[in-house]
Amino acid sequence: MKYAKIISSGIYVPKRKMTNKEFEELTHFQIDPYFSEQIGITHRYISDETETPTYMAAEAAKKALARISMKPEEIDLIIVGTDTPEAISPPDAARVQYLIGASKAEPLAFNVNASCANGALLLDIASRYIALGDYRNVLVIGVYAMTKFLSWKYSWEALFSDGAGALILTADDKPGYLGSVSRCDGSWWYNWGIYMGAGTMNLNGFERGLHKLDLRAAYPATVNEEGWPILINKLMEKCNFTKEEIGMIFFTQVRKKTIITVMEKLQLPVEKAHMVMDKFGYTGSACVYMAYDDAFEQGKLKDMEGKVIIFLTSGVGFQQVAVAFRG
Amino acid sequence: MKYAKIISSGIYVPKRKMTNKEFEELTHFQIDPYFSEQIGITHRYISDETETPTYMAAEAAKKALARISMKPEEIDLIIVGTDTPEAISPPDAARVQYLIGASKAEPLAFNVNASCANGALLLDIASRYIALGDYRNVLVIGVYAMTKFLSWKYSWEALFSDGAGALILTADDKPGYLGSVSRCDGSWWYNWGIYMGAGTMNLNGFERGLHKLDLRAAYPATVNEEGWPILINKLMEKCNFTKEEIGMIFFTQVRKKTIITVMEKLQLPVEKAHMVMDKFGYTGSACVYMAYDDAFEQGKLKDMEGKVIIFLTSGVGFQQVAVAFRG
């Protein structure tokens, strides 16, 4: 058996920045000081017409490849995670394969959708491909273009920002990948989403506004505040490591106060949960890879030899996935 | 290491049937005798408003569970493969988890999209989850609601039919799962698809007809006629079995003549490629699971002890995936 190991990262941030003040002027809602202080978000990035999901994903991937001088044809598998796809069909992943210049090498490419739980899930799927020995280098990309689905009339829309994050994993003889835990409860499916699709992608669906992100019933804050510590504890038990061995946790960057509360519950220093919502806003499927890239750039992943790095991601549906790697 | 083994199947076929003659009356195209003879399709099933992707997927899954008296809470993972999803977000899989009554057990559930290559790909992903020993029972479902995206004005639209197929895999100590091969070439991404998504899901996109399945440039017939034998040969080499050991191949049910040609090229009897397009039409992500279920019902999978069963699926993007199981 082989063990997946993260060897590179890259991100893409759209050109246009919108501050909280600009958002307030546009929507006539007052979002500050709440958004800056509780959510941790002071601005967001809005992708333009040319910054499509496959474009942003490919740009992030190219940076991850360039960082380690890896050629696109060395990639054996490309997994794109998003719930804001460029098209209903074909999957974004094939287009990204072409855009990074890998199509002649014909690596497998597919999309996964567990909404914003994609970050940890893609790492888990990639690691299981690598485990059996027949896939060596796997490129995982989370991409988020949620601002393209906003109505710009609700205060909660201030959360969303666009961007892409890519990680490259390779096969190693020692962990690396330790394992994963997950939970999913589909009874929440109708709470929050973009409910246009088969059967509703028609004029009537447009009139009902189904092509826009719709918050029909809020999730209780406890979904993450209570759910995340439980998952971390399960992960430690399943993968046989202690709290003291945890070097870094990358949580879904959806709310600063939630991450602080969860780290307090776990009795872990908050510095071990690197946060980037103040830099990039909330970027859904991309956020934990963007956080990893940012931590790497700041040198915070230098002393991770032997430590455990965790990705814990949550998404509407809902799903929660946590995955652990030894550094 | 554990080996995935297929232990059950179930399908869902929509209530409304449309014959080739009805299609001809509707579209004013003459499709027969070509469609009946070359494609192998004489009728199709059109899902109604209540037969949504998650409904059809859940119905197929319930039949697969009932066949082996398995309870929904015994399922550890649900993977739904489709390129005709019920919504952009959340993924169909979480809703299916709820509809089959598994939500209290909280099994992981996510969507995969490799378009019509989903059939073999989902079996490959499921097998890799089972391989590491921490997931025991996996439910994979392919669902297709493509008629909901048709314009009913092109002759090629006679291909499409709706439906769902579900397989259940479980962990065993011997193969079972042998391995997989794949290829993907994203330079064909713009040929055929439903090109509405992030950036185009607006009134302008609607006016451009992007919410409908669009055939912009046909794939050459050689993509499958030449590609499939190459993949089968690669699969035999990688998984170390001979042509004589092949018990059954389930190909994407897109064209009868292609399957006959491929079997001739492989010098295999055509009876070893069970076909169902004459029964169900072309059902995309669902078709190989529906073919498996049909072969099982006909008793054709009774003498597969020690033989190799292959699933080979192709989809727009494009992707081709083949996976092998020892019976």
Image: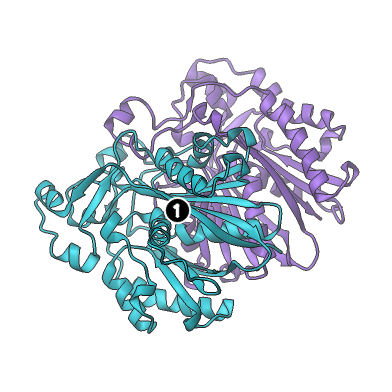
Chain colours: A purple, B cyan
Say if A28 sits above or below B285 in the image: above
Image coordinates of residue B244 in percent, x first then y, are: 47, 83
- The quarter of the displayed image where residue B216 is located: bottom left
Chain designation of label 1: A
Image quadrant for the C terminus of chain B?
A: bottom right
Query: Which of the pair B45/B71 is nearer the observer?
Result: B71
- The quarter of the displayed image where residue A252 is located: top right
Q: Residue at x 34, y 49 (%)?
A: B194
* In the displayed structure image, the side of residue A30 where residue B166 appears, left or right: left
Query: Which of the pair B101/A172 is nearer the observer?
Result: B101
Q: Residue at x 33, y 30 (%)?
A: A205
Query: Which of the pair B118/A99 is nearer the observer?
Result: B118
Image coordinates of residue B217 in percent, x first then y, are: 27, 62
Image coordinates of residue A244 in percent, x first then y, are: 90, 43
* In the displayed structure image, the side of residue A45 where residue A70 appears, left or right: right
Query: Counting other residues with Cα less than 10 Å from the Cα at mark 1, is it few (<14), some (14-19), or many (20 or more)?
Result: many
* In the displayed structure image, the side of residue A235 where residue B115 appears, left or right: left
Q: Amino acid at mark 1?
A: Pro
Q: Residue at x 62, y 32 (%)?
A: B104
Q: Residue at x 28, y 46 (%)?
A: B147
Query: SS for tag 1?
Result: loop
Image quadrant for the N terminus of chain B?
A: bottom right
Image coordinates of residue B248 in percent, x first then y, are: 44, 71
Inspect this view and state whether residue A324 appears: yes
Count of marks overlaid on the render: 1
Say if A27 sits above or below B132 in the image: above
> Where is mark 1, residue-wise?
A91
Inspect this view and state whether residue A256 appears: no
Say if A306 sits above or below A182 in the image: below
